[in-house]
Image: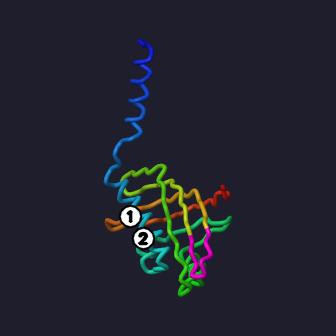
């Protein structure tokens, strides 16, 4: 019993350290990422632009800018496709006016004909604070294999 107490104390200390509250800056950074994906889901290209600054995407072995992403999304306009994202933040670091985030992105798609699709990515973004607002400057995305 005497050796169990120190082990339990150590475990509790570790869990408490990992459960620390996020800073206001970390919350703002994460909300910017959520807002960007909400704009993608709504196919609101102007709103997408408002959350970015000279953004570059590393997608499928290519480097894209925002116009390339928008060109890939335009065919979905008026088709009634619904996209729902779920972001699970893994790590968010903020240093002065720069930040980086690692997160899992899960997207479910529903077409008007009832067809469903699903995709999972592990992604990272870098952001800068520009005129008091966080802006995404780089997004790197790795599609994860489908799991049953």
Vertical placement of residue 148 versus 62, above or below: above
Q: Residue 134 carries which label?
A: 1
Please provide percent x and percent y for residue 11.
Answer: 43, 28
Q: Residue 51 carries which label?
A: 2
Residue drawn at point x = 37 percent, y = 35 percent? 16
**The C terminus is located in which quarter?**
bottom right
Extreme front residue here? 114
**Segment colored magenta:** 109-117
Residue drawn at point x = 50 percent, y = 65 percent? 85
Q: Are marks 1 and 2 in contact (CB under 8 Å)?
A: yes
Residue drawn at point x = 55 percent, y = 79 percent? 81
Residue 93: say if magenta: no
Please provide percent x and percent y for residue 63.
Answer: 62, 68
Which is more toward the observer, 113 or 35?
Answer: 113
Q: Which colour scheme is used?
A: rainbow
Vertical placement of residue 138 versus 9, above or below: below
């Amino acid at each position: 019993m005497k050796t169990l107490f120190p082990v339990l104390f150590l475990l509790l200390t570790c869990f408490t350290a990992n459960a620390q509250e996020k800073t206001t800056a970390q919350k703002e950074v994460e909300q910017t990422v959520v807002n960007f994906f909400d704009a993608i889901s709504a196919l609101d290209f102007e709103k997408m632009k408002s959350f970015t600054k000279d953004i570059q995407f590393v997608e499928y072995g290519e480097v894209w800018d925002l116009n390339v992403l928008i060109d890939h999304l335009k065919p979905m306009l008026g088709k009634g496709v619904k996209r729902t994202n779920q972001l699970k933040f893994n790590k968010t670091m903020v240093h002065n006016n720069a930040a980086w985030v690692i997160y899992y992105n899960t997207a479910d798609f529903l077409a008007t004909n009832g067809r469903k699709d699903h995709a999972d990515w592990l992604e990272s973004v870098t952001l800068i604070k520009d005129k008091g607002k966080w802006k995404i400057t780089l997004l790197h995305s790795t599609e994860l294999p489908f799991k049953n």
